[in-house]
Amino acid sequence: MLSLGALAFATPWALAALASLPVLWWLLRITPPQPKLVTFPPLRLLLLLRPKEETPAHTPLWLLLLRLLIAALAILALAEPILNPQAVQRDGEALVLVIDDGWTAAPRWREKIARADALLESAERDGRPALLITTAAPANGEAMQPSQLMPAGDLRPLIATLQPKAWASDRAALVQALQQARLPDSADVVWLSDSLRDDESGEGTYTLAEWLLRLGPVSVITAPDDVALALLPPVTTAQGDNIIVRRSGNATGDQTVTLRAVTDQGRVLARDSLSFSGRAETASHKLDLPSELRNQLSRLEIEEQPSAGSVQLLDDRWRRRPVGLVTGGAVETRQPLLGDLFYLERALTPYAELRSAPVGELLQREIAVVVLADVAQVVASETRQLEQWIDKGGVLLRFAGPRMAEATDALLPVKLRQGARQLGGALSWSQPQRLGATPETSPFYGLAGSNEVSVSRQVLAEPEAQLGDKTWLRLEDGTPLVTATQRGKGWLILVHTTANTLWSDLALSGFYVEMLRKVIDLSQGITGTGEAADTPLPPLSVLDGFGRAVEPGPAVQPIAPRSLASTKPNPRHPPGWYGRLDSRQALNTANAETKLLPVTNWPSAVTQLRLDATSREMHLLPWLLGAALLLFLADWLIGLGLRGLLPARLSGWRKPATTMLAMALLLASGVVEAQPRRNTNPLSANDEFALKASLDLRLAYVVTGQADVDQLSRAGLYGLTEVLFRRTSIEAAEPIGVNLEADDISLVPFLYWPITPQQPQLSDAALRRLDLFMKTGGMILFDTRDQAMGLSGTAASPNTDKLRQLLARLDIPPLMPVPDDHVLTKAFYLLQDFPGRYSGGTLWVERNPGGDKDGVTSIVIGSHDFAAAWAIDANGRPLAVTVPNVPRQREYAYRFGVNLLIYTLTGNYKADQVHVPALLERLGN
């Protein structure tokens, strides 16, 4: 490679051809142009006589220079000139490419990979070998080790597929691995760094840099102005859920980021902004959502910087915390309204998972809050279990009552007096007491409705110095009504009146519900002490380095619930969901201790470069070849003009000045960038399907592998698409076939599935996609196509048996025949039957679709061979005969298809009663 400042030539030997330009000059100079053809008109000979003009013996100078320019451009193009080439390292030395691929490297990942590819391209031109080292543990769970030394061109495809990991880099472990690896004795080292330490001291980064200096000069490429972000776990306080975002310590100015709160189905429930000011490293935001919506949350994420560290998965402990209810008696079995648990159950049911059992049995399972309603004495063994459970983060909420007024144990926040204070007795009031002012330090501060509560009886606390600090709620006369104390990581809380209406009307107020919700929010979530804490949780889905949910790899292993909180994400246990679908727990990349500290102590011998400091290379070969081609075309036109072969109206081209001006305009307007795109791969089948399905509305059918069935399905949906275009406002593109094992069916709204006995069983991944498709608004029309068989009794066709096998592995809701008032009967046309190729039979739909899908059934099952009735050829002629062969049957089949698609795409708005008068009027006419 020959370098001349900002210009370099990848094939410099081609420049030797420039020496032939003088020879070309001489050849063109002695070769006259071809004779000009002149028409000889004998009758006008005298009129056309002109002064004698000599034919030049040599090619005109301007034309000669033009042709030499064409030759020079072609020669320069063959030399492959490069503008702004990457810095050339030492000749012959190997290139060692070190890339940080932990989750903190996710920002600007494409730019980093493009820079690495440019370095390898430069090494490939120089014929130098290269070697790749990554600083995060590999996803396959194997030990960290560098790649083999190989030609730089062979390493480029490996770099193109490199992705950031969902766990942090481990540079200290990498140094130990490099000490055992075979590396070149001398090399040029380039380190694409994320600019952050992987430990608080930065010792691992410094040690790795010093070790790499043994191989040769080290250049570190960083983006020092970029700010990394980490989303920390939400902090639940008495005032609400506090969301904290931490940024790297190199940030110096104001910054705003966007927080999104998302459900399992991808629905965004909240989108709020968090602002950093000055040099602040954290920004906080109070997430204010109704409990009904809060319980649906499964994910918090930062929009501006997708990475595993900017995502927090919210598991079942966040959404619905299990609450155990224990009562001291069984009065509710005879008089429910007087029961100790009646009002508790109704107040907590919308917000928590309730379990009623003895204390010992409750603590054998995962539990967040235990409520003891008028339980005076807890047996000794259960008391020890409760104490240990509270220390680990549990919340024990106790209510007073007649039993506690007589005797109690020591598991209380305050010491109680014997007996109870009641209306009309000793230490009594003349009238029921209202609630007093709520202390500002209380979790109940700011709750509405407290002035509506009156108390007629309570248990009293013995005076003590800390009683004021322990009081969360008082009566008007200052006596405590709710006291609490923190014990370990948990809370011990006492309500000095009953959980029912026996001593107060607290249980009848809205304040009661809000008070209980605040108590539940104080819990640390699920804290198990039984066998469930030792049962390994299998992985359900994991996060990649960009924070996207992916399937667990073969190296991912189950994790014990006890060690979930202390486990740092790694290849064996990446961040994601673990457990069962009905009870899952989350492992997140970022935790409360996560810090993003910039590297400030690189060794002095390390050269620091900026990621965006060097301009990109520009290959001039296509530019020069394009210019040479345009000049060649201009030379050809000029030659035609000089020989008189151009039309008369273009005679102006014969003048050299005019010719040169036209040629200049042609070059100015015709030269466009033709920079070749390197590493451009053709679209995969999955990408091609995704583009087709997302850019246009299309009806889809399941590819069964049987050519005749698939062709008829395509022709049927093509015919239905044409009918929809002519009769409705739906403008769909051509139908598309779906491979359930590979294609993303979430991109299509409707799926036609013809059942055949030969269809193989679906994989678990395909079943999960189907289940998600039906639960997020998609519709599947299962067609067994066996209505003509006329089977009766318990007999079933092979197609029906296959359908039963398929549905047995899916979460299918209860089904029912289409009722007379279903939206399918009136979505567009008024219908009573739903024929296809065959008439009769039953069409099945979901019994209760639910409001989350706008009342649209996710599954329709029929046996009428609908696609055959809809199918047409290219000329619009039907491909199959209806049975019976009644002309109107095909028309009604089309009408059913129109109703079905209108229903799928618009929902159940026709179920609104506002349409009833118009429909009745049409039926009457």
Image (cartoon, rainbow, N blue to C red):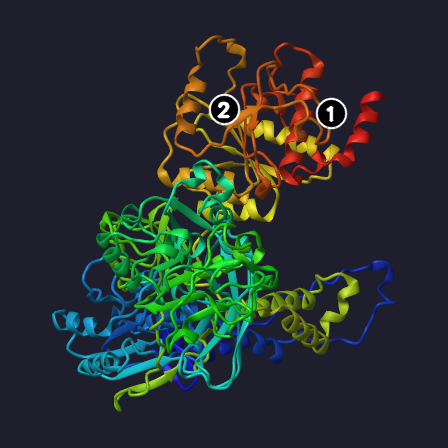
- State the SS at label 2: helix
Q: Which mark is residue 830?
A: 1
Mark before the other along the chain sequence, 1 or 2: 2
The amino acid type, in three-letter code, at marker 2 is: Val
**For this view, does 823 lie left or right of residue 228?**
right
Quadrant, the N terminus: bottom left
Height in image: 858 above or below 457? above
Q: Looking at the picture, tell me which residue is in the foreground, 403 or 749.
A: 403
Question: Circles 1 and 2: CB distance less than 8 Å?
Answer: no
> Quick check: can you spot residue 374?
no
- Residue 576 occupies which quadrant of the picture? bottom left
Q: Which mark is residue 524?
A: none
**For this view, does 295 lie left or right of residue 760?**
right
Residue pointed to by mark 2: 709
The amino acid type, in three-letter code, at marker 1 is: Leu
Quadrant, the C terminus: top right
Residue in view at x 65 percent, y 65 percent: 637
- State the SS at label 1: loop
Height in image: 863 above or below 479? above
Height in image: 841 above or below 444? above
**For this view, does 891 lie left or right of residue 741?**
right
Q: Looking at the picture, tell me which residue is in the foreground, 486 or 861.
A: 486
Residue in view at x 60 percent, y 80 percent: 61
Q: Looking at the picture, tell me which residue is in the foreground, 625 or 349.
A: 349
